[in-house]
Image: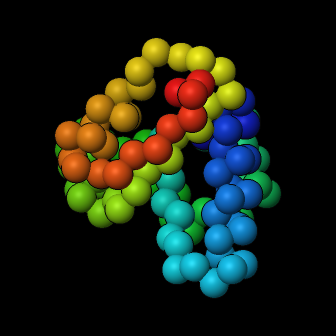
């Protein structure tokens, strides 16, 4: 989780959905880099870094996954994991 990777953009979108009354639950997993605890209010559950044995159960509980990035990068493995699990995926051009 980092600002450079777009975490603040996702939080803003989640907050907007919650204010509109959408039943959104926002769970995050991974390393929190430059995102202070004060900017984690949008997160319902912080799973931290998952053990490899927990990855399949994580994806089994995900309805949709959004990957934002402010710069172009190679194909992230997280997209491949989600697609393999049959999860709906969305990514920016930078992802």
Is residue 95 placed above or below 37 in the rendered structure?
A: above
Left or right, residue 61 beside residue 70: left
- Residue 5 location, quadrant: top right
The residue depicted at 63 percent of the width and 84 percent of the height is 21
Q: How many labels does the image show?
A: 0
Percent across and percent down for residue 39 are 76, 55
User: Does the image show residue 40?
Assistant: no
Left or right, residue 77 beside residue 47: left
The residue depicted at 67 percent of the width and 38 percent of the height is 6
The colour scheme used to paint the residues is rainbow
Left or right, residue 29 beside residue 55: right
The residue depicted at 71 percent of the width and 47 percent of the height is 9
Outermost residue toward the right? 38
User: Does the image show residue 62?
Assistant: yes
Is residue 92 placed above or below 37 in the rendered structure?
A: above
Percent across and percent down for residue 59 are 28, 52
Is residue 59 placed above or below 20 in the rendered structure?
A: above
Outermost residue toward the front? 93
Outermost residue toward the bottom? 21
């Amino acid at each position: 989780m980092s600002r450079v990777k777009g975490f603040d953009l996702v939080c803003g979108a989640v907050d907007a959905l919650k204010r509109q009354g959408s039943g959104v639950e926002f769970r995050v997993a991974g390393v929190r880099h430059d995102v202070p605890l004060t900017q984690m209010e949008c997160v319902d559950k912080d799973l931290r870094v998952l053990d490899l044995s927990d990855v399949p159960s994580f994806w089994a509980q995900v309805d949709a996954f959004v990957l934002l990035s402010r710069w172009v990068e190679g194909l992230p493995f997280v997209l491949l994991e989600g697609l393999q699990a049959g999860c709906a995926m969305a990514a920016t051009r930078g992802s």
